[in-house]
Every structure is written in C-alpha cells, then in structure tokens.
Image (cartoon, rainbow, N blue to C red):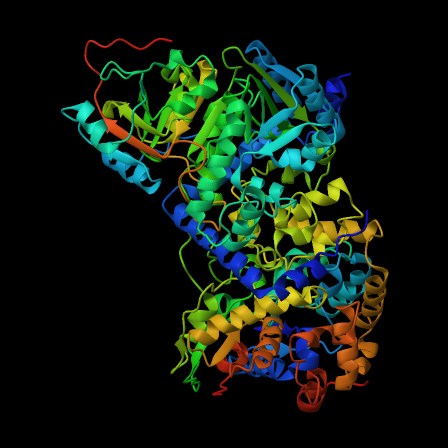
Amino acid sequence: MQVALMIPCYVDLFYPEVGVATLELLEKLKVDVVYPFDQTCCGQPMANSGCYEEAQTTEELLIQNFSAFDHIVTPSGSCTHHLRHKFTAAPDSPERRKISAGVYDLVEFLHDVLPVREFPGTEFKHKVALHTSCSAIRGIGLASMSERVHDPKFSKPKQLLERVPGIEFVDFERPDECCGFGGSFSVTEEAVAAQMGYDKVEFMRKAGADYIVSSDMSCLMHLQGCSSRLGTNLKVLHIAQILNGVTQ
Amino acid sequence: MSFRNTILENVRNNQPSARELPAIPKFHSEQSVDLKNQFTAALKELYGEVVTEPPADLKAFLKERFPSAKAICSTVPEYTGNSKPEDFTRWSDAGSIDVTIVRSPLGVAETGSVLFSEEEFRVNTIGFLAHDIVILLDPAEIVENIHDAYCHPHFQDKAYSLLMSGPSGSADIGGITVHPAQGVMTLTVIFWPRAQTETTQTV
Amino acid sequence: MSIVDQAENAAEFINDQTHEQHLDQLLWMLRTRRDEAASRVPEWEQLRDLASQIKEHTLSNLAHYLEMFESRAKANGVTVHWAQDAHEHNQIVYQLLSDRKVDELIKSKSMLTEECDTRRFLEGRGVRVSETDLGERIQQLDDQPPSHIVGPAWHKTTQDIANVFAKAYGSDKEKADPVYLAHVMRENTRPLIERARAGMTGANFAVAETGAIVTVTNEGNADLSGNVPELRICSVGLEKIIPRNEDLAVFVRLLTRSATGNSITQYTSHFRAPRQNGEMHIILVDNGRSSRLGMEKFWPSLKCIRCAACMNTCPVYRRSGGLSYGSTYMGPIGIIMMPTFDIRRYSELPFSSTLNGSCTNVCPVKINIHEQIYAWREVMEEKHQINLVKKGAMIVAGKVLSNPTLYRIAGDTMEASLKVLPRFAIYNQLNAWGQHRDIPPPAKETFHDWYRKHRSQATGREINR
C-alpha cells in the first residue's frame, strides 16, 4: 500500500524526530511512503483565524502536492480534522474532496486501515499519561468523549499502546479537558492557555506519570512548555516514537 | 404604538425552511417500576421527606414534627386547621402561616414532584409563604415520569399550576444547595389514599 | 463602545488565584453532576435529539406559534404587548407601573431584563427594583452584572458574599456560612415581597397551545413575584415559544440536569391566566431575534434554553470568569450570540475559544456552538473586525506557507523558525509564548532537511533547494 506522508509544519520545524519516527514506523509496516517534498502546511493556522483568503493559497498548494494519492497519513489529529472537515478555503473540486476523503491521522491509519495490533521490538517501561487532543476525540472520533455518557468507552491510541510491553497508564483527573493549546489561542489568550496547561500537567503529575504521550505534537509542545516552566519532571513523547521503538 | 406587525413580518421573512415536529415517546421503563419507592428516593434527593403511612393521629404527628407551630392552614377534610385559605384576603398575609396542609392530585416518581394549582391552594401563596408544608398524596395517583405528568388537565385548565419538588433552596452561594430560600423550609409528603366518599375539591 | 478585550480581563482574573480556582472547581463539579444525571437517563441522547428538533421546528414556524400563543393568552385574560427592542420593552414596563402609580417592583431572575438593562432604566425613573433571586440580589447589592446565567454570583466566594451582605444588611461579616447568608437574604427579602404591588419575571418557556409561560426556579421567587402582587409582568424573548405541553416535558427533563445535575428544580411553575383580583401582562421581545433568525449559520443559537452547561464545561470560561466577557451572555453561547448585538464591541470574543467542542456535546438542544464560533471568525475577518496587526501576520504567513522554497528557507535556522511559526500565531509580542511557558527546544534540522539527507537518494529523486 502506498501513502503520502504529510508532516505538520510545527513538527517539520520543531520536532522532526516525530516525522522520522512516523516514516520509519510506516516503512517497518511495509507501507510504501512517499513524501511530497514541496509540502508546507495544511492551512489551519490561517483558517482558524478566519483568514480564509490567506489560507487559500496554502491549501491549494497542499492539493497540488497530495491529490495524486489515495491515502494521506499525518501524525496529527488536528491537521486530519482540518483536512477532513474544514478544508474549504480553496474552491470545491474533485481533488479537494479526494484529499478530505483520503486523509488519515496516523493512529486511525494504524488502527483502522492497516490494521496493526502488534509492535514487535518495542518496550516502554514507564508510567504514561495518555492525552488525546480535542480534534482527535471530538473532531475525528479517535476515542470516546466524557460528555456523551452513554457511548461505549474506547480509545484507539490506547489500544495501540497497550501492545507495547511495560507500558503503564495512569488515570488522571479531567482526562479529556482541553490542554489549552488551541492553535493561535495559545498566544492570543496566553494566560488562560497556560493555566489550562498547568492544571493538566498537575493532574498528570499527581497521578504519578513520567511521560505525557499523545498523537498530537501541538498539544505536547504546549504541555512540555508548561511542564518545564512548572519544574515538573514530566517528559513528552509522540505515540509514533513509542510505537517505533523509543524506550525513553 | 405596537410593533407587533413589524415583528411578525420580520419573523416570517426570516424563518428557516420548515422542519417537522417529532413524535414524543413516553419513555416508560421496560422493567416494572415501584412508583412509591422511586418517588420517595427522588424526593429525598431534593431534601423532601416521605411518610409512607397515614399517621394514626395526625394532630399528634404535627405537634411532634412542628412543636412550635401555632397557625395551621388546612384545605383537607383529614385535618381541621385554625385557618382556611379564604381567610387570607391579602395574599401576602399567608406569611403568617406556620404549616400548610394540602392534598396534591398527582405525584411524579421520576423527580419526587407533586402537582398543585389554584384548585388545591385556593390562595396560591399558602403554598410558598408558609413556614412548612405537609402534602397528602394518594400513592395511586403517582405517575412514572414528567411526560405522564404533563398529560394532567391542570396544565390546560388552570390559571396557575406548579410542580413542587422539595422545599425551597438555593445553590447561588458557592454552588452548594442550602435551605431555605424564599419559600417553605420543609416539605413532607404523606402517602394517604383518598377517602372513598370524598368528592373532588372544588374552588 | 470599546472592544471587549476578554483575554486581558481573563489574565486579570487568573492573577487572583483564589477566585480562579474557586470558580473552576465549582463549575467543574457542576459539569460532573451533569454527567451523573445524564447517565441515569438512558434516553438522554434521544431527548437531546427531540429537544433540538422541537426547537428547530418551532423556529421554522415561529410566526405561526407566536400568533397562536398571543391568541390563547388573550383568551385567558392576559394582556400581550410586543416590543421591538430593549428600549421599547423598558418603556412598556415603566408605563404599566406609572399608570398604576406603582413605584416599587420585585423581580425574579430574567436574563432578558439584563439584556434590556431594565433595572437601570426603571431606577432612573424613580422605581425601586428589588431582585428576589439570591444570586441576582448579591450582584445587585454589589453593583455588578451577573457573571453566569444560572448562578449570577458563582464567581464570588462565600466570604465575598458575607462582605456584601454585611455592608448592605449589617449582617455578621465573620459568618461566611451559606445557610446563615440564605437566612439573611430571606429575612431581608420577605418584607419586600409581602408589600409588593408589582412583580416581574422572565420565562424559561412559553407554551403556544395554552398561552402559558413557564418559570423554573429553586427558590420559588418567581412564584412569589408572580402570585403576591396584583400586577404581574412577564418578559418573554420570541425564541422561548414551544408548541405544546407535551414538548415542554422534554425540556423540563433536560434543563435542570444540564444546569446543575438535579433532576428538576424545586419550582416548575406555569402561569396561564391572571390570579384572582390580579392583572397579568406578557411582553414579547424581539431585540434582534427576528434578524438572527435569518442568519444561515447562526440562527440555531436561538434554540438555547439558558441552562449554562456550555459555560460549566468550557475550560476557557472557568478560568476567565464570566465578567471577563463584558456581555450579558457569556462563555460559549455568549460568543455566538453577542456579535449579533454589537459586532464591533464583541469582535474578539470568537477568539476566546480553543474550539475544543465540549460545549456542543453538552448542549441539551444540540446547538453546534464550536462550529458557530469558528464561523464567526470568518465573519469578523470579512467585516474587517480583525486586529490589523494580526491580519498583517496572517498575510505574511499565507505568503510563506504557500511557497515551498520560501518556507524551506524560513525553516533553515531555529531563529528563523521561531520568527515564522509563532509569528503567524501571534500579533502582539514575539515572546508572548514565553511569558508562562518555556519555548520549544531548538531542532538541529527540519524534517525536510533530514529527508533530503536520508531518503531522497534512496528514491533516486533529485531534490534541490
């Protein structure tokens, strides 16, 4: 199976190791990965600010780079949600729709499309606070949400991570409350974003976590910043890194 | 000058495309429900109390429960109080009542609510300005849920109808419900079947 | 009026850690109680669907139901007035009082009267107005608007309230005990209620088939305001209409559980006709609702039943405090309603959100709140209500991100990355990220760089700058 790999702009610039882990993991799983080199961004930062005109050219570039592919995989629930449900800055076209129909978050791709249930050669002997982003939960349904009390409880990222020997999940308060990143919100409403991040880090620390793990690096970027400012020892890792064999 | 027609015209011009009114199910439980138990539990959650059998001596019961009560306003044949609602020509004077005793024609098991209207109160304020309220309720007149409750003719016919669920309280201070607020301090329901010969009370 | 800077107001609120923690914990407790209540109703999601459908049906036939309501109410002996805007509404109220030489009014909670600023209007004309709802009364005595639509004083600690009552009523400042304070309120309010000749309430619902209005309270103050005085005035927003009692049942089952987690409030009251020897007046109020009905993306906000579940769950509201929004309605529902009242003043509210979607999923009438917040951002941009510096940053971002070469050059050095990436997210200072958080650690190379080094040879593709 061939997929095109989409690397979120902030991963490209700040956490390339997450991109590397994603690529290596997919290759291990015998997926033929193509990385369109001229890619930049999914357009979300502009679109989320209401600046559709400014998002349009970026989104058109994405269509250009990716419309030849049936499957696009990205290690980001937030970019996936945007491309699947809010990819409307560029005019409607069969190519645009193809992108929306063919994009997958890495966890979805591993859990639903491949599907894969074993990760040989992996080990992670640590206590993990699993954080699933709001885009991942309420946007693309990677896990059940606490608001809908009668829905059966499930978590695709957890189901994958459970296959990694040694991993121990800690239960922390308010597990699906937003971490406070929210894109530009994290800077425009900085005090609230930080307070939300501090609270979440503190809940995780209290529960005994060593690592915060998520399928969204944007949340982790924010939580890492809050965690180190608070002076806690919590470290962050993207799920791709653990599934690709990182042990610490 | 009334803006009625302008408002209605604006509304008509702006209404979204027509959508259907759905059918509303009754949502009765598939298992059999012990209505008395459910009512009692629900009312307890709202700080009301249920007495499951009519006391042998109602006067003694009241004296024990409300030792300092002097002014008792009753609308029920089961008890003669020292005032009737009609005595309060100024509705605000009902604040002098210590205990109101009244019968409710309907209880709701889902929420522990009891129904009233001007038919039962005759002077509505006896239901809230009194210090305490004691309510006679025939257990045969308890319905399962709110959907059932709204079938009662009071909601179509009466000038004022009320689903009263526990004594008045407020959570406005720190989110903790405290009693009392503006209305009655305590609410007690006595399961008391209607007397066979009793006819429906009329105003 | 100046633009509300909700972010700055929120930062001030957070600085006061005692109050921020108090509010956050109180409201999260209510969210938890809401979850517990919903879990005890197996048909909860079905009720939400029904409630949404009933409201959408009604709003799509609103003129018909308004006329039905009016005609039934009139047949019941009620006088029905229509007010196009807040001023009209206040005028009608004042006229009713002054015609009867009434200069004192008790009222129960009504967000509509807050919207119309009725109390200030009447007080300016010599009418003494007393709130009978405990939360509203606290705020009235403290000369503050409500901070939450269900618990107007929830942002205050018990000590704050003890201080307010001590100042207003001479009660004991040291007794920061809710039960004691409730007694103080009761003792001071009872005489006002007993001598009142006019009472005013809002309405949670207005039932078209019977012409009745419905109030939902725990204190019974609407029942007192509606039954004790001879003159009763009731303010009803157009969108409060529902077709039948049968429909009312659905909302009554959802409302209190969503608001506080109790199955029902202490008093669910239905006023269909005047009391004996009394007069009842209903004022149907538009104040922008009929216009909002015509807004393709935003009319579903009219389904709102004022439960405030969205506020309780909103992580931003809980840490900002309701007063930070500078508006009658706050939190998620406030963000999507307030721009319809004043697009300029509330132009930044749609950005006081992380778009997390929790609000949409607790809303008992299934308003797509977070989607409307997103849609309002585009409206603000179209109507040039976006901060110019921010707009400038977005234009730069758009240029860089749509040009692969420019983007890769910008990503070359860490310093450049930091200039590009947060720049299109921020519009004030470069170091805003760093105020409360550590900046992301530098990456040695971008993924693009890594790929070029480690993979492009394998694929045999020539990759140039």
Quadrant, the C terminus of chain C: bottom right
C409 lies above or below A106: below
Residue at 60%, 12% in the rendered image: C74
Q: Residue at x 73, y 38 (%)?
A: C295
Q: Position of residue C363 (x, y in %)?
A: 54, 45
Q: Position of residue A152 (x, y in %)?
A: 40, 55
Residue found 25% across the figure and 31% down from its top: B67
One can see residue A70 in this view: no
Give coordinates of residue B120: x percent, y percent: 36, 16
Image quadrant assignment for residue C183: top left
Q: Is residue B94 left or right of residue C456?
A: left
**Above/below status of B175 relative to A81:** above
Q: Is residue A40 left or right of residue C143?
A: right
Q: In the image as oriented, which residue stretches furthest toward the left?
A: B56
Q: Quadrant of residue B151?
A: top left
Of C69 and C129, the residue lying toward us: C129
Residue located at (54% from left, 80% from top): A237
Please tell me how many numbered marks the rendered image carries: 0
Quick one: C375 or C105, which is closer to the camera? Answer: C105
* Residue B79 falls left or right of residue C371: left
Which of A225/C42 is in front?
A225
Judge whether A5 appears above or below C363 on screen: below
Quarter location, residue A170: bottom left
Report whether residue B109 is seen: yes
Image x and y of residue C198, in percent: 59, 22
Considering depth in this image, is C14 or C380 the residue closer to the camera?
A: C14
Q: On the rendered structure, is B196 left or right of A216?
A: left
